[in-house]
Image (tube, rainbow, N blue to C red):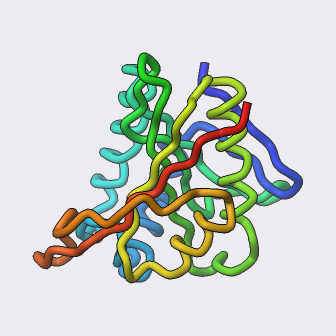
Amino acid sequence: MFPKLETDRLILREITYDDVERVFACFSNQEVIRHYGQDPLQKIDQARGFIDFFAKSFEEKKGMRWGIEIKGEKGLIGTIGFNAWSPKHKRAEIGYEIHPDYWRKGYMAEAVEKILSYGSDTLGLTRIGAVVFLENEASNNLLTKMGFKQEGILKNYMYQNGEAYDTFVYGYLPQK
């Protein structure tokens, strides 16, 4: 059973086919994916493929991806979750995105805080990593604010539009 989480303003829930249009709206938006290491989605079927991938990843205990919804409103504003989840090694990487209509309102900080505590308290994670394009100031600032420590730079680590980019690597070690 996929865990449903709540914050003061948000519901973090399983992503279903009912969310396909909102998933497409995020991942087809050039502003959203410009620091994501992937090309924008071109067809709605690709968003269904993302939803299938999220479900399979959870089923195989390789990742968890929540849809972010504002309480009292219908429809996702973004997604957040753990990639490269290794229950054996008690680690995962955090990933997230939010539609530009909802930028700079504190929603992502609220969602990150919630899944960090869930990862630590419920999943028993002792390390949560993140990989972020050097140019992604908003995400770099958010992770630092949330207690992540910059651990280094990965040279030519991700490609966007056929061009190699360096990324920062971050680590978050929950306090027990």
> Quick one: 77 or 133, which is closer to the camera?
133
| 167 is higher (above) or lower (below) than 5 | below
Q: For the C terminus, give its image quadrant.
A: top right
**Rendering coords of residue 157 (x, y %):** 21, 63
Q: For the N terminus, give its image quadrant.
A: top right
Residue furthest front in the image: 151
| 92 is higher (above) or lower (below) than 86 | below
Left-right relation of 33 to 172: left
| 7 is higher (above) or lower (below) than 143 | above
**Rendering coords of residue 161 (x, y %):** 17, 77
Residue furthest left in the image: 162
Q: Residue at x 45, y 54 (%)?
A: 130
Residue furthest right in the image: 8
> Quick one: 52 or 31, which is closer to the camera?
31
Q: How many marks?
A: 0
- Quadrant of residue 104 within the rendered picture: bottom right
Left-right relation of 65 to 173: left
Q: Residue at x 46, y 69 (%)?
A: 25
Left-right relation of 153 to 113: left
**Rendering coords of residue 121 (x, y %):** 72, 28
Left-right relation of 67 to 130: right
Q: Residue at x 59, y 42 (%)?
A: 173
Q: Residue at x 66, y 43 (%)?
A: 115
